[in-house]
Image (spheres, rainbow, N blue to C red):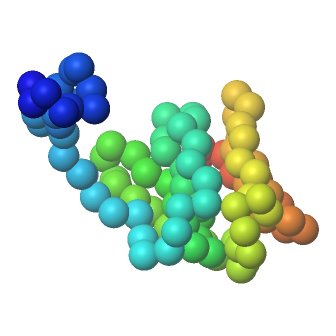
Amino acid sequence: MPPDAKSLIRLTRTPGIVVPDTVSTGPIYALLAALGYLWAVSGSQLWRRSAISGWVSLGNIGTVYSAQNIDIDNNADFVVVVNAPKCVLLSALY
């Protein structure tokens, strides 16, 4: 290590890390891993990703004015996405 190094440990990337794909061009406002999928709110779209089908758009949830307007959560059967004052309720079978 150089004598003027800020860290005593060498920081390097992990070999094998790759970016598998891109959701969309919009900013990511919310992510949730639930019910065997990865759910994302990107721009004004709700997306679902599976290992088999990749990213699938589930539709427009309206204009997102800030990340504070978005809430996403789940229980054993459903995912709920709130873009105040709208609410979207989805099952994994959607």
From the viewer's side, name the closer residue of 80 and 26. 26
Question: Residue 26's x, y, as percent?
Answer: 50, 74
80 left or right, relative to 26 = right
Q: Nearer the viewer, residue 63 or 48?
A: 63
Would residue 15 be found to the left or right of residue 83 on screen? left
Residue 11 in the image, given as x and y percentages of width and height: 21, 30
Q: In the displayed orientation, state which residue is furthest to the front.
A: 3
Kindly give the residue lying farthest to the right in the view shown.
85
Residue at (90%, 68%) from the top-left corner? 85
**Above or below, 34 relative to 20:** above
The answer to whether one can see residue 1 in this image is yes
Q: Residue at x 40, y 46 (%)?
A: 50
Going by the image, does 87 lie left or right of 93?
right
Q: In the displayed orientation, state which residue is furthest to the bottom.
A: 63
Closest to the observer, 23 or 91: 23
Give the residue displayed 10% in from the left and 30% down from the top: 2
For residue 94, above or below residue 1:
below
Quadrant where the image shows the N terminus: top left
How far from the left and from the top, in percent, is residue 7? Answer: 27, 26
Q: Position of residue 65 (x, y in %)?
A: 74, 75
Query: Which residue is at a point 61% across and 60% down the rendered structure image?
Result: 29
**In the depicted structure, whether residue 88 falls above or below residue 76:** below
Whether residue 94 is visible here, answered yes or no, is no
Q: Tell me where residue 33 sits by quadrant.
A: top right
Q: How many marks?
A: 0
